[in-house]
Amino acid sequence: MTLSLAAATTIAHAAFAEGGQRGVTVMSVVVTDPGGHIRLAMRSDAQGIFGVDTALGKARTALGFNRTSLHLSKIFADPCAVAAITAATGGAFVPLGGGCVVQQDGVTVGAVGVSGGLPDVDEAIVVTAAGAAGLTILR
């Protein structure tokens, strides 16, 4: 099972709406399938060149460990461990808050990554956006 394009679009629009309410006006949102492949990516007009890549890295990091990337940022405080995993994953490991695995009826259907705000704010945006599509976050 994977996310429909309609669900991915709902998530992205909800994320931008929530970001705006939280004062995050420069952001990117990436929604992936369960394998970490991009289902949908959007960025605000003012977002720089790293926004989508950062959001994708957060989503893939959450998928890779079945945890929110914010949770992982607290676990991986050792710079050597972060460097090793980042190298092993070809730079795909981004242990910053804002990446979450999303589930429907207890089944992982993808992940969402947001970049643009502080890590805890990015994660809160993802949680709200996933809820708008009727999905839950794997914690």
Image (cartoon, rainbow, N blue to C red):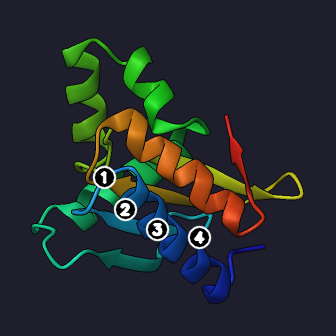
Q: In this view, does 123 lie above or below 125?
A: above
The residue located at (26%, 53%) in the rendering is 116
Q: Is residue 99 above or below residue 30?
A: above
Q: Is residue 23 above or below residue 104?
A: above
Q: Are marks 2 and 1 in contact (CB under 8 Å)?
A: yes
Query: In the rendered structure, which disc, 4 or 3, sits on the residue that comes first in sequence?
Result: 3
**Is residue 95 at least partly visible in the picture?**
no
Of 134 and 1, which appears nearest the observer?
A: 134
Q: What residue type is labelled 1?
A: Gly
**Residue 20 got which mark?**
2
Label 1 sits on residue: 23
Q: State which quadrant residue 65 falls in.
A: top right
Q: Which amino acid does label 2 sit on?
A: Gly
Calculate the distance from the C-alpha at mark 3 to the C-alpha at mark 1: 10 Å
Q: Do the residues labelled 3 and 1 touch (CB within 8 Å)?
A: no
| Left or right position of 106 against 110 | right
Query: In the rendered structure, which disc, 2 or 4, sits on the residue that comes first in sequence?
Result: 2
Q: Which amino acid does label 3 sit on?
A: Ala
Label 4 sits on residue: 33
Residue 81 lies, in percent from the top left, at 28, 19
